[in-house]
Amino acid sequence: MTFSKDLFKIQSNKPNDVFYTPKKLALELIKLIDIKENETILDPFRGKGAFYNNFPKCKSKGWAEITEGKDFFILNKKYDWLISNPPFSKLSNVLLKSCALSNKGFAYIIPSHSLSHRRILKCAEFGFHLNKIIYFKNPKKWGLGFQMVFALFTKEKVQNIICIGENSNYIQKNLEVF
């Protein structure tokens, strides 16, 4: 009986969805997306602005942040790119809303185990395909024991998904400060 009470306690805990992205990590991840100057970008979960404040020169940029009264889930304006670190507990809804608001693609920091076949297929139904998975070492301050990735979905369907490992100098070279 103790086990079931403990299990209920775990299941009923509110999720902690606040993991601020370090600026250096955001800068490195943004570089991996081919954003043109005539395109628009939205940071749907701005937090402290690690992504938003470091977006490259573009036509326009927008943001949402529920703690500041701008709820991503009620936005209707479309953007070319959506880039952020979303709340993991709402990932299915985040992906569906991103499919509705994006013209070209979206990229999010998410737990690697959340890239389920069902979620990938659902995005494909809306014309978005997983193109890149970038593994990186979790920032120590997050205190997470599971692997995080930066997943890029675009309208372009590729034969082979590009995976960049966490030990690659390509992404880790500037991130050792964590």
Image (cartoon, rainbow, N blue to C red):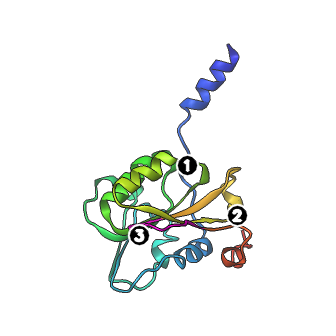
Residue type beneath disc 1: Ser
For residue 155, which quarter of the picture?
Answer: bottom left
**Which residue is identified by label 1?**
114
Cα–Cα span, label 3 and label 2: 27 Å
User: Of helix, strand and loop, which one carries label 3?
Assistant: loop
Mark 1 crowd level (few <14, some 14–19, many ≥20, 10 Å Cα): some
**Which residue is identified by label 3?**
156
Are the two marked residues, 3 and 1, in contact with CB atoms closer than 8 angstroms? no
Q: Number of callouts in the render?
A: 3
Instruction: Please tell me whether residue 158 belongs to the stretch shown in magenta.
Output: yes
Of marks 3 and 1, which one's residue comes earlier in the chain? 1
Q: Is residue 38 above or below residue 137?
A: below
Q: Position of residue 147 (x, y in %)?
A: 67, 55
Instruction: Please tell me whether residue 140 belongs to the stretch shown in magenta.
Output: no
**Which residue is identified by label 2?**
137
What residue is rendered at 56% in x and 34% in y? 13
User: Of helix, strand and loop, which one carries label 1?
Assistant: helix
